[in-house]
Image (tube, rainbow, N blue to C red):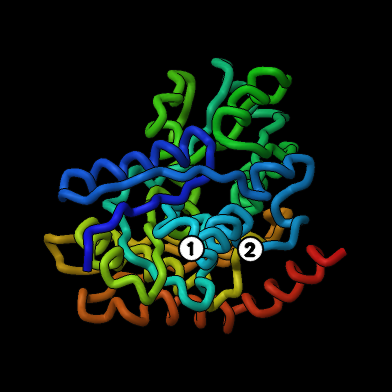
Protein backbone atom coordinates (compact mmCIF):
# COMPACT_ATOMS: atom_id res chain seq x y z
CA UNK A 1 0.00 0.00 0.00
CA UNK A 2 1.24 3.48 -0.80
CA UNK A 3 2.35 5.50 2.19
CA UNK A 4 -0.40 7.83 3.31
CA UNK A 5 -0.62 10.87 5.55
CA UNK A 6 -2.21 9.95 8.89
CA UNK A 7 -4.85 12.54 9.71
CA UNK A 8 -5.03 13.11 13.48
CA UNK A 9 -8.40 14.27 14.79
CA UNK A 10 -8.51 16.26 18.02
CA UNK A 11 -10.61 18.71 20.00
CA UNK A 12 -9.35 22.27 19.64
CA UNK A 13 -8.61 23.03 23.30
CA UNK A 14 -5.00 23.72 24.25
CA UNK A 15 -4.70 20.43 26.17
CA UNK A 16 -6.27 18.36 23.38
CA UNK A 17 -3.96 19.95 20.83
CA UNK A 18 -0.96 19.26 23.08
CA UNK A 19 -1.98 15.59 23.15
CA UNK A 20 -2.42 15.48 19.36
CA UNK A 21 0.97 17.12 18.76
CA UNK A 22 2.59 14.64 21.16
CA UNK A 23 1.21 11.73 19.12
CA UNK A 24 2.15 13.51 15.89
CA UNK A 25 5.78 13.90 17.00
CA UNK A 26 6.02 10.23 18.00
CA UNK A 27 4.63 9.15 14.61
CA UNK A 28 6.91 11.58 12.75
CA UNK A 29 9.91 10.18 14.66
CA UNK A 30 8.92 6.75 13.35
CA UNK A 31 8.88 8.10 9.79
CA UNK A 32 5.13 8.58 9.30
CA UNK A 33 3.57 11.62 7.64
CA UNK A 34 0.80 13.31 9.64
CA UNK A 35 -1.71 16.14 9.58
CA UNK A 36 -3.70 17.53 12.54
CA UNK A 37 -7.41 18.29 12.08
CA UNK A 38 -9.13 20.08 15.02
CA UNK A 39 -12.89 20.01 15.65
CA UNK A 40 -15.17 21.34 18.41
CA UNK A 41 -17.12 18.82 20.49
CA UNK A 42 -20.54 19.36 22.10
CA UNK A 43 -18.82 19.06 25.47
CA UNK A 44 -16.78 22.15 24.66
CA UNK A 45 -19.71 24.10 23.23
CA UNK A 46 -22.38 23.52 25.93
CA UNK A 47 -20.85 24.99 29.07
CA UNK A 48 -23.97 25.97 31.03
CA UNK A 49 -24.99 22.44 32.06
CA UNK A 50 -23.18 19.88 34.21
CA UNK A 51 -21.86 16.97 32.13
CA UNK A 52 -24.16 14.42 33.74
CA UNK A 53 -27.22 16.54 32.85
CA UNK A 54 -26.31 16.32 29.16
CA UNK A 55 -26.97 12.57 29.42
CA UNK A 56 -24.30 11.59 26.91
CA UNK A 57 -21.36 9.39 27.76
CA UNK A 58 -18.49 10.26 25.50
CA UNK A 59 -19.64 13.82 24.85
CA UNK A 60 -16.02 14.83 24.21
CA UNK A 61 -15.35 11.90 21.89
CA UNK A 62 -18.57 11.67 19.86
CA UNK A 63 -17.71 14.38 17.30
CA UNK A 64 -14.35 12.76 16.54
CA UNK A 65 -15.93 9.31 16.31
CA UNK A 66 -18.29 10.63 13.63
CA UNK A 67 -15.41 12.36 11.77
CA UNK A 68 -13.49 9.07 11.77
CA UNK A 69 -16.44 6.97 10.61
CA UNK A 70 -17.08 9.55 7.85
CA UNK A 71 -13.45 9.25 6.70
CA UNK A 72 -12.46 12.84 7.60
CA UNK A 73 -9.74 11.73 10.05
CA UNK A 74 -7.79 8.49 10.48
CA UNK A 75 -7.12 8.51 14.22
CA UNK A 76 -8.33 10.44 17.25
CA UNK A 77 -6.36 11.27 20.38
CA UNK A 78 -8.24 11.48 23.68
CA UNK A 79 -7.73 11.80 27.39
CA UNK A 80 -8.60 8.18 28.10
CA UNK A 81 -10.83 9.03 31.06
CA UNK A 82 -13.21 10.82 28.62
CA UNK A 83 -13.65 7.74 26.42
CA UNK A 84 -16.71 5.51 26.96
CA UNK A 85 -15.91 1.91 27.93
CA UNK A 86 -17.76 0.69 24.82
CA UNK A 87 -16.30 2.14 21.62
CA UNK A 88 -18.56 2.66 18.56
CA UNK A 89 -18.78 -0.27 16.13
CA UNK A 90 -15.86 -0.15 13.72
CA UNK A 91 -13.58 1.88 16.03
CA UNK A 92 -10.85 0.21 18.10
CA UNK A 93 -8.22 1.17 20.66
CA UNK A 94 -4.94 1.50 18.76
CA UNK A 95 -2.53 2.50 21.53
CA UNK A 96 -2.36 3.71 25.11
CA UNK A 97 0.58 6.01 25.71
CA UNK A 98 2.73 5.86 28.83
CA UNK A 99 0.78 7.27 31.71
CA UNK A 100 1.45 10.65 33.33
CA UNK A 101 0.59 11.75 36.87
CA UNK A 102 -2.67 10.13 38.07
CA UNK A 103 -3.34 12.51 40.97
CA UNK A 104 -6.10 15.05 41.41
CA UNK A 105 -4.93 18.34 42.89
CA UNK A 106 -6.65 21.21 44.67
CA UNK A 107 -5.69 24.56 43.20
CA UNK A 108 -6.24 27.17 45.93
CA UNK A 109 -5.62 30.87 46.58
CA UNK A 110 -2.90 30.69 49.22
CA UNK A 111 -5.08 30.34 52.31
CA UNK A 112 -6.04 26.83 53.44
CA UNK A 113 -7.97 27.79 56.59
CA UNK A 114 -11.20 26.79 54.85
CA UNK A 115 -10.17 23.13 55.12
CA UNK A 116 -10.85 23.42 58.87
CA UNK A 117 -14.15 25.29 58.46
CA UNK A 118 -16.71 26.10 55.75
CA UNK A 119 -15.51 26.35 52.17
CA UNK A 120 -16.60 26.41 48.53
CA UNK A 121 -14.89 24.13 46.03
CA UNK A 122 -15.48 24.02 42.26
CA UNK A 123 -15.52 20.95 40.02
CA UNK A 124 -17.56 19.64 37.08
CA UNK A 125 -16.91 16.02 38.09
CA UNK A 126 -19.45 13.98 40.05
CA UNK A 127 -16.62 11.78 41.34
CA UNK A 128 -14.61 14.72 42.66
CA UNK A 129 -17.75 16.31 44.12
CA UNK A 130 -18.75 13.12 45.96
CA UNK A 131 -15.24 12.40 47.25
CA UNK A 132 -14.78 15.99 48.41
CA UNK A 133 -18.12 16.01 50.27
CA UNK A 134 -17.30 12.63 51.79
CA UNK A 135 -14.18 14.15 53.38
CA UNK A 136 -15.53 17.70 53.89
CA UNK A 137 -19.31 17.32 54.44
CA UNK A 138 -19.70 20.95 55.62
CA UNK A 139 -18.33 22.35 52.34
CA UNK A 140 -20.26 23.53 49.27
CA UNK A 141 -19.34 22.21 45.82
CA UNK A 142 -20.19 24.32 42.77
CA UNK A 143 -20.17 23.26 39.11
CA UNK A 144 -17.17 24.20 36.99
CA UNK A 145 -17.16 23.52 33.26
CA UNK A 146 -15.00 24.27 30.25
CA UNK A 147 -11.52 23.35 29.14
CA UNK A 148 -8.59 23.58 31.57
CA UNK A 149 -7.79 27.22 30.68
CA UNK A 150 -11.44 28.29 31.06
CA UNK A 151 -11.76 26.55 34.43
CA UNK A 152 -8.58 28.15 35.75
CA UNK A 153 -9.86 31.57 34.64
CA UNK A 154 -13.24 30.98 36.32
CA UNK A 155 -11.48 30.02 39.56
CA UNK A 156 -9.56 33.32 39.49
CA UNK A 157 -12.71 35.33 38.76
CA UNK A 158 -14.88 33.80 41.51
CA UNK A 159 -14.68 33.85 45.30
CA UNK A 160 -14.36 30.06 45.57
CA UNK A 161 -11.67 28.72 47.91
CA UNK A 162 -10.32 26.34 45.29
CA UNK A 163 -11.00 23.98 42.40
CA UNK A 164 -10.05 20.37 41.71
CA UNK A 165 -8.06 19.53 38.57
CA UNK A 166 -6.25 16.51 37.17
CA UNK A 167 -2.58 17.18 37.79
CA UNK A 168 -1.57 15.69 34.41
CA UNK A 169 -3.64 18.14 32.37
CA UNK A 170 -2.15 21.20 34.05
CA UNK A 171 1.38 19.80 33.83
CA UNK A 172 1.07 19.08 30.13
CA UNK A 173 0.35 22.69 29.20
CA UNK A 174 2.44 24.31 31.95
CA UNK A 175 -0.57 25.69 33.82
CA UNK A 176 0.13 24.06 37.18
CA UNK A 177 0.35 26.92 39.70
CA UNK A 178 2.49 27.05 42.84
CA UNK A 179 -0.62 27.17 45.06
CA UNK A 180 -1.83 23.57 45.02
CA UNK A 181 -2.03 20.47 47.19
CA UNK A 182 -1.95 16.85 46.03
CA UNK A 183 -5.19 15.03 46.84
CA UNK A 184 -3.57 11.64 47.34
CA UNK A 185 -6.64 10.48 49.31
CA UNK A 186 -8.90 11.00 46.25
CA UNK A 187 -9.10 7.93 44.00
CA UNK A 188 -8.71 9.21 40.42
CA UNK A 189 -11.05 8.63 37.50
CA UNK A 190 -10.48 5.35 35.66
CA UNK A 191 -7.60 5.89 33.17
CA UNK A 192 -6.78 9.38 34.52
CA UNK A 193 -3.42 10.60 33.26
CA UNK A 194 -3.48 8.27 30.23
CA UNK A 195 -3.86 9.19 26.55
CA UNK A 196 -5.46 6.81 24.06
CA UNK A 197 -5.32 6.69 20.26
CA UNK A 198 -8.33 5.18 18.51
CA UNK A 199 -8.60 4.20 14.85
CA UNK A 200 -10.85 2.35 12.42
CA UNK A 201 -10.71 -1.42 12.88
CA UNK A 202 -10.19 -2.05 9.15
CA UNK A 203 -7.28 0.40 8.71
CA UNK A 204 -4.25 -1.90 8.96
CA UNK A 205 -1.71 0.75 7.92
CA UNK A 206 -2.77 3.15 10.67
CA UNK A 207 -3.18 0.45 13.32
CA UNK A 208 0.31 -0.84 12.60
CA UNK A 209 1.69 2.71 12.91
CA UNK A 210 0.01 3.62 16.20
CA UNK A 211 0.60 0.20 17.81
CA UNK A 212 4.27 1.22 18.07
CA UNK A 213 3.26 3.94 20.56
CA UNK A 214 1.61 1.51 22.98
CA UNK A 215 2.83 1.24 26.59
CA UNK A 216 1.90 -2.23 27.85
CA UNK A 217 1.89 -1.43 31.57
CA UNK A 218 -0.41 1.56 31.08
CA UNK A 219 -2.61 -0.47 28.72
CA UNK A 220 -3.09 -3.20 31.35
CA UNK A 221 -3.67 -0.81 34.28
CA UNK A 222 -6.24 1.25 32.36
CA UNK A 223 -7.95 -1.95 31.16
CA UNK A 224 -8.40 -3.04 34.79
CA UNK A 225 -9.80 0.37 35.78
CA UNK A 226 -12.15 0.64 32.81
CA UNK A 227 -13.37 -2.92 33.35
CA UNK A 228 -14.29 -1.92 36.92
CA UNK A 229 -16.12 1.15 35.57
CA UNK A 230 -17.94 -0.85 32.89
CA UNK A 231 -19.22 -3.50 35.30
CA UNK A 232 -20.46 -0.82 37.68
CA UNK A 233 -22.15 0.90 34.69
CA UNK A 234 -20.41 4.19 35.22
CA UNK A 235 -19.68 6.37 32.24
CA UNK A 236 -19.81 10.06 33.14
CA UNK A 237 -22.83 9.55 35.32
CA UNK A 238 -21.65 8.00 38.59
CA UNK A 239 -19.05 8.91 41.20
CA UNK A 240 -16.57 6.10 40.52
CA UNK A 241 -12.83 6.10 41.19
CA UNK A 242 -10.37 3.41 40.12
CA UNK A 243 -6.59 3.07 40.13
CA UNK A 244 -4.49 0.03 39.21
CA UNK A 245 -0.72 0.03 39.73
CA UNK A 246 1.97 -2.52 38.90
CA UNK A 247 4.71 -3.38 41.38
CA UNK A 248 7.73 -4.74 39.54
CA UNK A 249 9.48 -5.88 42.74
CA UNK A 250 6.56 -8.10 43.81
CA UNK A 251 5.26 -8.73 40.26
CA UNK A 252 1.75 -7.83 41.44
CA UNK A 253 -1.09 -5.47 40.56
CA UNK A 254 -2.73 -3.36 43.25
CA UNK A 255 -6.23 -2.08 42.64
CA UNK A 256 -8.17 0.57 44.55
CA UNK A 257 -11.75 1.32 43.62
CA UNK A 258 -14.65 3.31 45.05
CA UNK A 259 -18.31 4.02 44.37
CA UNK A 260 -19.97 6.91 46.19
CA UNK A 261 -23.40 8.47 46.48
CA UNK A 262 -23.68 11.85 44.74
CA UNK A 263 -23.78 13.68 48.09
CA UNK A 264 -20.72 11.76 49.29
CA UNK A 265 -22.48 10.34 52.35
CA UNK A 266 -22.14 6.74 51.18
CA UNK A 267 -18.80 5.30 50.13
CA UNK A 268 -18.08 1.73 49.07
CA UNK A 269 -14.35 1.01 48.72
CA UNK A 270 -12.25 -1.97 47.71
CA UNK A 271 -8.53 -2.67 47.59
CA UNK A 272 -6.92 -5.85 46.27
CA UNK A 273 -3.41 -7.07 45.44
CA UNK A 274 -3.11 -9.97 42.96
CA UNK A 275 -0.25 -11.81 41.24
CA UNK A 276 0.51 -10.50 37.75
CA UNK A 277 -1.15 -13.53 36.11
CA UNK A 278 -4.57 -12.61 37.57
CA UNK A 279 -4.97 -9.11 36.11
CA UNK A 280 -7.50 -9.96 33.40
CA UNK A 281 -10.48 -10.23 35.77
CA UNK A 282 -9.25 -7.95 38.53
CA UNK A 283 -11.49 -5.00 37.63
CA UNK A 284 -14.42 -7.34 37.00
CA UNK A 285 -14.06 -9.14 40.33
CA UNK A 286 -13.68 -5.93 42.32
CA UNK A 287 -16.76 -4.40 40.68
CA UNK A 288 -18.80 -7.55 41.39
CA UNK A 289 -17.76 -7.43 45.03
CA UNK A 290 -18.84 -3.78 45.30
CA UNK A 291 -22.19 -4.57 43.63
CA UNK A 292 -22.83 -7.48 45.97
CA UNK A 293 -22.11 -5.36 49.03
CA UNK A 294 -24.55 -2.51 48.52
CA UNK A 295 -23.29 -1.21 45.17
CA UNK A 296 -26.26 -2.42 43.12
CA UNK A 297 -28.67 -0.51 45.34
CA UNK A 298 -26.44 2.57 45.36
CA UNK A 299 -26.14 2.56 41.54
CA UNK A 300 -29.95 2.33 41.27
CA UNK A 301 -30.30 5.35 43.58
CA UNK A 302 -27.72 7.33 41.57
CA UNK A 303 -29.44 6.56 38.26
CA UNK A 304 -32.84 7.54 39.67
CA UNK A 305 -31.44 10.83 41.02
CA UNK A 306 -29.82 11.72 37.69
CA UNK A 307 -33.05 11.11 35.76
CA UNK A 308 -34.90 13.78 37.74
Q: From the viewer's perspective, is residue 258 above or below residue 177? A: below
Percent across and percent down for residue 241 are: 51, 59
Q: Quadrant of the N terminus?
A: bottom left
Q: Is residue 246 visible?
A: no
The residue depicted at 50 percent of the width and 71 percent of the height is 87
Percent across and percent down for residue 260 are: 63, 61
Q: Quadrant of the C terminus?
A: bottom right
Q: Is residue 300 left or right of residue 184?
A: right
Q: Which mark is residue 57?
A: 2
Percent across and percent down for residue 108 are: 56, 23
Circle 2 — which element?
loop
Looking at this view, name the residue that lies furthest to the left. Answer: 249
Q: From the viewer's perspective, is residue 264 above or below residue 1? A: above
| CB atoms of marks 1 and 2 within 8 Å | no
The residue depicted at 73 percent of the width and 54 percent of the height is 263
Between residue 152 and residue 195, name the one nearer to us: 195
Q: Nearer the viewer, mark 1 or mark 2?
A: 1
Q: Is residue 58 left or right of residue 248?
A: right
Q: Which mark is residue 71?
A: 1
Q: Which mark is residue 37?
A: none
Percent across and percent down for residue 165 are: 53, 37
Judge the density around disc 1: few (<14), some (14-19), many (≥20) Cα neighbours within 10 Å. Answer: few
Amino acid sequence: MAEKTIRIGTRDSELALWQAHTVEKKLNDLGYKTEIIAVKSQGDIILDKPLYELGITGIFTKTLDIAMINGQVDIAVHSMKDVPTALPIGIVQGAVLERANTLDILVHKGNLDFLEENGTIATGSLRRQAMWLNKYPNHTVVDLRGNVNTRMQKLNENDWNGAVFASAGLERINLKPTEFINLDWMIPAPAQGAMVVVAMANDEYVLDAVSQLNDVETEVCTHIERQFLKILEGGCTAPIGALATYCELEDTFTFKGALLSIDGKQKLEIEKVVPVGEWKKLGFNCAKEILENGGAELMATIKAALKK
